[in-house]
Image (cartoon, grey):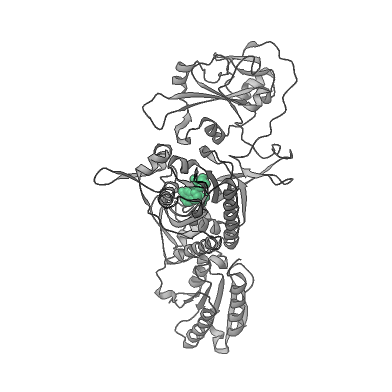
Amino acid sequence: MKASQMFLSTLREVPSEAEIPSHILLLRAGMIKKLVSGVYAFMPMGYRALRKIEQIVREEMDAAGAQEVLMSALQPAELWQESGRWYAYGPELMRLKDRNDREFCLGPTHEEIFTDIVRQQVSSYRQLPLNLYQIQHKYRDEARPRFGLIRSREFIMKDDYSFDRDEAGLDVSYKNMYNAYEKIFDRCGLNYRAVEADSGAIGGSNSHEFCALSEIGEEEIIYCDHCSMAATAERAAFKDTPASDEEMLPLEKKLTPGTKTIEAVAAYLDLPQSRTIKALLLETFDPEDPSAPVRYIACFLRGDRQLNKTKLINALGIPDYAVQFADEAAMAAATGCVGGFTGPIGLHDCTVVVDTELVGARNLCAGACEADHHYINVNYGRDYKADIVTDLKLLQAGDPCPVCGQPVKSARGIEVGQVFKLGTKYSEAMHLYFKDENQQEHPVIMGCYGIGVTRTLAAVVEQYHDDNGIIWPMSVAPYHAVVTVINPKDEIQMSLAGSISARLEAAGLEVVIDERDERPGVKFKDADLIGFPIRITVGKKAADGIVEYKLRRGGDNTDLTAEEAADAAIELYNREKIRP
Ligand code: ATP
Ligand code: MG
């Protein structure tokens, strides 16, 4: 391909809305263009890289025995009503109506559609197991689209659904997909970690996220160097301090003027924060009936702990968009809470959620639901009770590992994929049943497995770049090599460039000849920005058959004969084309 004929435009300036390297570089290299917030178009170079990733995904999914299909992005509301997610999915669902007022959405994911298609065809155990996938556009009206392809509103996902007759079958399907994901992310060259993940309101026993390690990652990963524990912070269990054997002391109310925070009351009463109770006041509405009155929730945990909102939401069984911090004045009128002085004693008409660790703790200090007052010697069971007792705590770096007790560490990652045991959630709601050998009916056991293909592209750039641009791993590079011609008017240079390129192409490499009428510095800058793994420069020494050979990842320019340069390029390509 000749650079002069390519639909290509690189930018010198950093686009103002872009904050992270992948977003900046993909825009600057002209690989993507923004249409509106969270919606991007792919230009030839970007699309080639994207298709490389898609192809890796396809090859590994096919090798794992999955069959590719293509569902529609436009989905009828009825199927989502059947599964119960039309409301539960909330404002992220892109809803629309046709001319006859029939409701649709643009699919953010496809559990309903696959379940529907499979139930039309599958009725016997003989048709199981089954594993279907697609690579397709998805739509999510994200509250905060940002970071370019990392969190967009239109993106490409590979989604796969497995259908098994029993849990043992699901275990096999799950492991199979997990292994395929490792191969996919290895082949993309990503430095990633598979971690236990939250399985959300779906319940389910098992889910793992594949996170590409990156400072800009939105996912916090907690892991232990002493054992194999690794989980998202949302998911990570907390190791409670053992129950105290202290005697319960008499409850006592204390004047604590102006002590509205844990820090203030702990200092005022000269207590460690671990001997205080922190209150968090929330409200929730019913997504199925937004006109119903709000429900108030008071959560209590040790003063030195942080709330893990995901654990709370799972315990309440409501979608996260339906939970928010309470309007304190309204909540005070309804429940008796007092901003800054709320404790579990004296509250009414609200759901009380108490962290497990408080149950065995003794003689703590809590707000008295009265301005400028706290109780001391508050004890669970004797002084207050909960509607729900559950682990509400966020595990943080330095806390003891829930498995082995050693201090855990934390890292940030970009969630590029997730595998999920769904069980019978969709098959029961939508009646996907099969008959066994004895004509007995059972719900099909499902799993689902997603990869953000466009997000993976961005994650690769996050891990493979420097100040000058992208450094594509060979396996996903839009082109493997650029042959830069210093003086395109020189016929010797052009002809040598043409013969090198022909040799490389014959060996399977994809090559751009940069014969644009530009200064060499411009061509080198563009080559670095675009990130061709290999650059062969044809200049004055072409008359002697000598060229410069340079790798984008680093190392010196070396003068080689044209044959040596081509040999080196082909050798490197063959070594890294499948896996960097
Ligand atoms: P997140 O927690 O980042 O919002 P998710 O857990 O909701 O993602 P899944 O439903 O598991 O996402 O979707 C499967 C994959 O699709 C994710 O692992 C991720 O790689 C990708 N993905 C999800 N949302 C987006 C988005 N807004 N933009 C780009 N890719 C996305
Ligand atoms: Mg996910």
Between residues 530 and 430, which one lies in front from this camera angle?
430
Residue 358 visible in the snapshot: yes
User: Which residue is at a point 51% across and 80% down the rendered structure image?
Assistant: 501
User: Which residue is at a point 51% across and 17% down the rendered structure image?
Assistant: 337
Q: From the top left corner, tell me how far across and down residue 1 is, in percent.
A: 45, 76
In the displayed structure, 117 sits above or below 335; it is: below
In the displayed structure, 482 sits above or below 415; it is: below
Residue 408 horizontal side relative to residue 55, left or right: right
Q: Quadrant of the C terminus?
A: bottom right
In which image quadrant can residue 252 be found? top right
User: Which residue is at a point 73% across and 22% down the rendered structure image?
Assistant: 244
Between residues 111 and 557, which one lies in front from this camera angle?
111
In the displayed structure, 540 sits above or below 303; it is: below
Furthest-front residue in this view: 438
Q: From the top left corner, tell me how far across and down residue 245 is, in percent.
A: 75, 20
Residue 297 horizontal side relative to residue 358, left or right: left
Figure label count: 0
Residue 34 horizontal side relative to residue 357, left or right: left
Between residues 101 and 153, which one lies in front from this camera angle?
101
Q: From the top left corner, tell me how far across and down residue 421 is, in percent.
A: 55, 45
User: Which residue is at a point 66% across and 27% down the rendered structure image?
Assistant: 357
Residue 147 visible in the snapshot: no
Q: From the top left corner, tell me how far across and down residue 467 is, in percent.
A: 56, 60
